[in-house]
Image (cartoon, grey):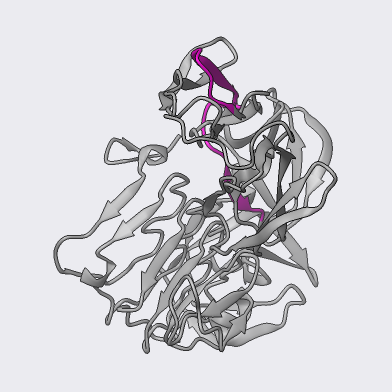
Amino acid sequence: MAYINGINKDDIQEVKFTGQLKVNSAAEMFRGLPNLTKITGLKNLDTSDTIDMRYMFTDCSNLKELDLSSFVIDPGIDKGYMLNGLTKLNTFKLGKSTHINESYLDTPGTWVSVGNGTEDAPQATQKLNSNDLASQRIDDTYIRPGAAIKAFYLDTDGKSIADETSLNGKIGNSYKLTPKTIPGYVIKEIPANATGFFTDQPQSVKFIYSAVPVSVPSTPAVSTPIKAANVIVHYQDERGNKLAPDTVLQGNVGDGYITSLVEIAGYTLKTRPENATGFYNDQNQDVTYIYTKNATGLSSVTRTVFHNSYVYDENGVRKKGEYFAGETVKTYSTKLIQGKKYYDLGNNDFIKAVNITGVTRKLKHNAYLYTKKAKRLGRKVLKKKYTITTYGGAIKINHKLYYIVGKNRYIKKANF
């Protein structure tokens, strides 16, 4: 478990800059803050002389919005993995001087430019994947739009009885659909996916209605609605312990209700109650969502493996399974096994931390970067006393030992 000035990194949810700040190095400034959801005031950071932005936002896996439009980023400075592991990012603002080449932006999906439109209705003259966005950047706001969610209103025979509706939103944002009031029909079935989240896949929500019996007048006399008893929504663990405040829903007798799950850090939904949707009546109704605790009670953090890694049990005994460089894993807490640091993957699976977050080393000699085929990578020279993160043990390439320092990046061991 990591701490910053006594604060548990996993407890940090928001960072706010309120005054001007000159930044010479931003390396690892926000790295590995799994529950960070908001950063405000980035415009107060003067980055015009910043020389290092490596890992600046790496593995901020719950951050949805990032505004770098005021940043001055020289295309030649080190930005290795600056934007790696931002799995939920859906709004990204860039400026004329924001060069994010070689930042390893790897958020999945397609980015579209807002242009002269809005974030809800982008102009979308540019449609790019993360790699192209980083290399072909144009100053604009970009979003990751989710696939459309369509609602259908059907009778019990599957026949449409009202015009369909469509919702649009950013990937990862929540949505909620409610049934229409349709003359001559009453709602019979509210589907489970009437609430949920936008994804990259189209979703269909089907509301089912029953026709009003013929004996019922087509134009009934106006009656006064009868207030129903409450619907009380509970969020509990498997032992009945409360994990979040109850939600109380109110309505009139006969109206339909829809409840929603909530995201609780460190827990995963185990059981969705059968009465998650239903109808108000004259009796109080309890709706209980049951959650199970994650492997360590913490939210998982998605990390990149940089060195081929075996899987071990809690005693350091090797198990079946291996992760290869470039793959991602979900990690929870850390654990010392026989004096070495490991990441907990859950289910009694552990992986050596040195293969993921590496070890910081200082160069004793000037050094070049090489590819995995031992070809020199450009003319850039890393100066003596420069510090850099290496991953795992040294590997042999063409009879010489190298340390892995990034994706397809190696430095000769003799230089350390």
| Residue 46 x/y as whole percent | 23, 75
| Residue stretch in magenta | 279-305
In x, y percent, where is residue 282?
50, 15
* Residue situated in front as seen by the camera: 261 or 113: 261
Q: Position of residue 196 (x, y in %)?
A: 60, 46
The quarter of the image holding the N terminus is top left
Could you tell me residue 219's position as x and y percent? Answer: 58, 42
Task: Identify whether 347 is placed above or below 15.
Answer: above
Residue 57 is left or right of residue 48, and the answer is: right
Q: Residue furthest left?
A: 19
The residue positioned 66% from the left and 77% from the top of the image is 370
Q: Residue at x 25, y 70 (%)?
A: 23
The residue under the point 30% across, 78% down is 70
Query: In this rendering, does residue 415 appear at all?
Result: yes
Q: Is residue 6 left or right of residue 173?
A: left
Query: Residue 99: which quarter of the image?
Result: bottom left
Whether residue 169 is situated above or below residue 156 in the rendered picture: below
Q: Nearer the viewer, residue 257 or 174?
A: 257
377 left or right of 235 in image: right
Between 399 and 233, the one lying in front of the other is 233
34 in relation to 202, above or below: above
Q: Mark yes or no: residue 339 visible.
A: no
Pick the residue in front: 233 or 278: 278
Check residue 413 for magenta coloring.
no
193 lies above or below 216: below
Q: Is residue 283 magenta?
A: yes
